[in-house]
Image (cartoon, helix red, strand yellow):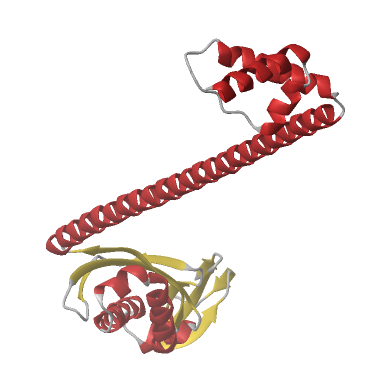
Amino acid sequence: MVKIITQPDRGVVITLGKYNKTLTPGFHLIAPFISHVIRVSTAQTPVDLDEQIVITKDNAEISVKISLKYHVTNIEDFVFKNEDSVRSMTQDTRASLRGIIGNKELNEVLNGTEEINQALFSGLSDVTAGYGLNVDRVNIDSVNPSKDIQDSMNKLLKATRERDAAIATAEGKSKSITLENEANNQALLATNTAQNTALVNSATAKATAIHTEADAQAYRVAKLDAALKGSSQNYFISQNIAAFKELAKSDANTVIMPNSTIDSLGTIPAIAKAFRSADHTTNQD
């Protein structure tokens, strides 16, 4: 009987109920009636497992969907050592997943799927080797908490967002107040500095003005003193006469003058004569 095996299959020949040989891809002749061929694919095969309910360490119920890929490594073991090697692999995968997730809390499961994949792959590699196949990859496609847990998580997430928003708003206001206070302090400092500078400048200007005025007054006095020192006796006599005239116009009956003034006025003939007449009259009285 003619049998053609196509790649990547292999053919397991069973003769009289016993394993005879393994056929590689190509053209083959086998004994009719007493022999038959079981085809086995050695290509990598994907398997999607049904969604599985798992309980976490903190008693949270979640549904997990996983997929895996495997390929046959030993034809005889795959056909003869296990009635259904693929089904056995699937059962072991589910059991390993329950054991791994059962030792983790919900947050660890939700945030550690890659770690779970690695642990699951490591555990399956040792178990499935006896089935004549090898698991090439395990992947958690989805992790969905129950509706009650999902609602609680949504409420917690909303509360966390509101808290973070409130904190951010408070921090923003605090920073704004701090910046405003700093600006006010800087403005106040600048104003005080300007006022102090203005006061200093004003005081300096006043002091300079007083000093300048004092210098001018001293200069005038010095000039006047110098002019008086250089004046003749007639100038002072003239000043005395002018003063005497002003006094004569007043209502005063008595005029008190220093002797030096009288002496200077006595040098004028007319006034001297008047003084002598006054003295003579006084003596007669």
Q: Residue at x 68, y 38 (%)?
A: 208
Placement of 156 over or under 221, stated as above or below: below
Residue placed furthest toward the front:
284
Q: Quadrant of residue 15?
A: bottom left
Question: In which image quadrant can residue 19 be found?
Answer: bottom left
Please give left or right for residue 42 compared with residue 17 in the image.
Answer: right
Q: Is residue 34 at least partly visible in the picture?
A: no
Residue lying at 31% horizontally and 76% vertically, measured from the top left: 90
Nearest the eye: 59 or 77: 59
x, y (%) of residue 154?
20, 56
As rendered, which of 186 and 224 lies closer to the eye?
A: 224
Residue 160 in the image: state x and y as whole percent: 25, 59
Q: Is 91 situated above or below 162?
A: below
Circle count: 0
Residue 17 quadrant:
bottom left
Q: Give me the residue at 22% from left, 77% from top.
A: 56
In the rendered image of this protein, does residue 246 appear above or below residue 146?
A: above
State the residue at coordinates (48%, 87%). Answer: 20
Q: Residue 285's spot in the image, x, y percent?
A: 52, 22
- Horizontally, residue 22 falls left or right of residue 152, namely right
For this view, does 145 lie left or right of residue 256? left
Residue 95 screen position, x and y as percent: 27, 82
Res 90 seen here: yes
Name the foreground residue: 39 vs 264. 264
